[in-house]
Amino acid sequence: MTLAALIAIYFVHLAAAMSPGPAVLLAARTSLREGLARGMWLSVGIGLGACVWAVAALFGLAILFKLAPALLWVMKAVGASYLLYLAYKMWKHAPDPMQSDLPQTARQRGRAGLVWLGIVTQLANPKPALFFGTVFLTFVPPDAPVWAYGVILGIVFFNDAGWNVVVSRVFSLERTRQVYLNLKTVLDRVFGALLAALGLKLALT
């Protein structure tokens, strides 16, 4: 396992982590509503969820998906249903005052709850297993030492959690939050519509 291969994995995965998706969208909304600290705990969960998919790919889940496409379809259907449920709750409660909003808010969730929400949101999309399977087949030799897999998991967690912390920081800025408070109903429905679109895309592709 060479340093060049690890660097390649880092940048390829960083690009994937930075692409807009349900986890990034939820990190943005959580930090807007609840502040940076809550967004960071959610980001930890997102990073852990990415590591779960990476480990699954290491054990051949991507190959299993190719051999049994129905399994991938079922997982995508379940994940899409979860994302559509979150989108429905966002849209429905968009006009509500801040204090009576979704049950997913940090007001009702502790740190562990936020971490769990991040993990579940990340696991709602099974496509990363295919991504990691491709990356490992391309860059990781079959005889790679155990430490190399540990480094790769560290890269995965750092990229996913780190990028979502950056997103949380941007959306927790006071100016950004003031814009959100002034346009809460509109923005919550935009977030809901985007999340619904991502859920439908997951189900149909």
Image: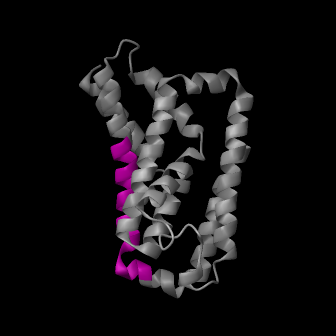
Q: Vertical placement of 37 versus 199: above or below? A: below
Q: Where is residue 139 in the image (x, y as percent from the top left)?
A: 39, 23
Q: What secondary structure is the magenta-colored segment mainly?
A: helix
Q: Where is residue 36 in the image (x, y as percent from the top left)?
A: 36, 69
Left/right placement of residue 130 relative to residue 66 reads left
Q: Give the range drawn in magenta.
A: 157-177
Is residue 24 at least partly visible in the picture?
A: yes
The answer to if 121 sits in the magenta stretch is no
The answer to if 170 sits in the magenta stretch is yes
Q: Where is residue 59 in the image (x, y as percent from the top left)?
A: 50, 23
Q: Which residue is drawn at 32% across and 20% down?
A: 146
Q: Residue at x 35, y 75 (%)?
A: 173
- Looking at the image, which residue sits at the far left? 3
Image quarter of the N terminus = top left
Left/right placement of residue 160 relative to residue 98 reads left
Q: Which residue is drawn at 28% across and 24% down?
A: 147
Left/right placement of residue 141 relative to residue 28 reads left
Q: Residue at x 66, y 54 (%)?
A: 82
Image quarter of the C terminus = top right
